[in-house]
Image: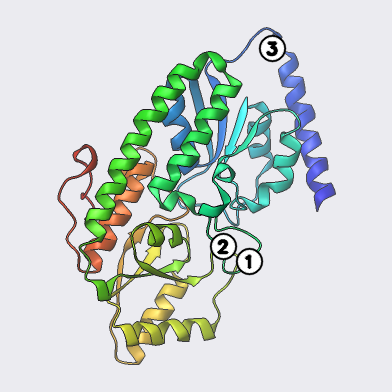
């Protein structure tokens, strides 16, 4: 598999080199041509880089980064880019060999791996690997945004003042978002502060906002939930009288429906709450298609579904807008 990936990479690299040969050596692209694996990472690069970066995202709305394999077109885009940004922490597991090859010729920034190891949670399925869903805590995500700023400044030193300014402005927004989340989620009655989701993407969210979280699947969607796990979750739902279970935009709702049906057979009705955004943001051009909007939507949706009171307005007057 590694040899096949390398052969494919070299073929595409050769083609990209031929394209590059037609460009004058002195022609330095401006703004920087950046490729980001996920829209969440891409949003951070745009916020920090501003007009000095042009960002292309590989994984769009509803795409699961745990399972996605880079295509030849993806590899060609990364080869042509000045820089490549990814979450890292094994989120984009299928990109590993491609990243190793790319790093020989250009910066490949695994921004999540800049976070201190003592702030990372363990992957329940793979004890030697961290949980990669660090964006679920906006305060923790500020460390990733700092890594983005530092990488851009190293690649384009003349842009450092602008990158510092973009970083500071975005971090201020992230901290307002976190304050809103704390206020809203704290209003959920203590006995209902349990978040039941399709897969375990919300552990950092739960740690930040003093909630309990249970994912039917593990941290990675590669781990499948069996009948025994489904029955365990159904029993927990009934025992704890959990009122709502949440589907995720990038994960199949099959297991969620199995839990709802299992609980119904045993006389307990559990509602399916509105869709949450976990591994992917909403559609481009929508509020939920931004990182701030994605987390706002999640916070407001969870708060209302579990019996809390979400404030009507928050960051930039937009928060609390989830239906």
Of the pair 300 and 156, the residue shown nearer to us: 156
Vertically, is 50 above or below 297? above
Q: Which residue is mark 1?
A: 127
Q: Residues within 10 Å of mark 3 (few under 14, many from 20)?
A: few
Residue 125 falls in image quadrant: bottom right
Q: CA distance from mark 3 to mark 1?
A: 48 Å
Q: Is residue 164 left or right of residue 238?
A: right
Residue drawn 54% across the image and 69% down it: 218
Colour scheme employed for the rendering of this structure:
rainbow
Residue 217, which numbered label?
Answer: none
Q: Which residue is mark 2?
A: 122
Asked if marks 2 and 1 touch (Cβ < 8 Å), the reply is yes
Residue 23, which numbered label?
Answer: 3
Residue 107: x percent and y percent?
66, 30
N-term mark: 3 or 1: 3
For the C terminus, which image quadrant? bottom left
Q: Residues within 10 Å of mark 1 (few under 14, many from 20)?
A: few
User: Total of numbered circles in the picture?
Assistant: 3
Q: Is residue 84 left or right of residue 307?
A: right
Of the pair 241 and 252, the residue shown nearer to us: 241
């Amino acid at each position: 598999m590694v040899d096949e990936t390398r052969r494919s990479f070299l073929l595409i690299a050769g083609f990209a080199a031929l394209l590059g040969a037609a460009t004058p050596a002195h022609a330095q692209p401006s703004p920087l041509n950046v490729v980001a694996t996920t829209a969440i990472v891409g949003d951070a690069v745009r916020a920090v880089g501003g007009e000095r970066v042009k960002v292309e995202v590989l994984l769009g709305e509803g795409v699961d980064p745990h399972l996605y394999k880079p295509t030849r077109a993806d590899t060609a885009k990364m080869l042509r880019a000045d820089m490549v940004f990814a979450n890292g922490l094994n989120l984009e597991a299928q990109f590993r060999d491609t990243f190793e090859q790319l790093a020989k010729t250009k910066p490949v920034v695994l921004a999540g791996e800049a976070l201190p190891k003592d702030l990372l949670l363990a992957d329940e399925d793979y004890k030697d690997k961290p949980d990669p869903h660090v964006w679920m805590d906006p305060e923790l995500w500020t460390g990733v945004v700092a890594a983005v700023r530092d990488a851009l400044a190293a690649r384009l030193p003349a842009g450092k003042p602008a990158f510092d300014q973009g970083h500071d402005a975005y971090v201020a927004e992230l901290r307002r978002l976190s304050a809103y989340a704390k206020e809203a989620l704290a209003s959920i009655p203590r006995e209902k502060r349990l978040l039941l989701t399709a897969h375990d993407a919300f552990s950092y969210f739960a740690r930040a906002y003093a909630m309990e979280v249970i994912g039917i699947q593990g941290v990675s969607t590669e781990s499948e939930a069996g009948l025994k796990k489904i029955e365990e979750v159904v029993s927990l739902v009934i025992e704890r009288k959990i009122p709502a279970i949440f589907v995720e935009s990038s994960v199949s709702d099959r297991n969620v429906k199995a839990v709802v049906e299992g609980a119904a057979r045993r006389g307990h009705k559990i509602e399916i709450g509105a869709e949450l955004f976990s591994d992917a943001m909403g559609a481009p051009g929508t509020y939920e298609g931004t990182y701030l909007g994605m987390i706002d939507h999640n916070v407001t949706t969870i708060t209302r579904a579990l019996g809390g009171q979400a404030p009507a307005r928050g960051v930039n007057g937009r928060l609390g807008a989830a239906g």
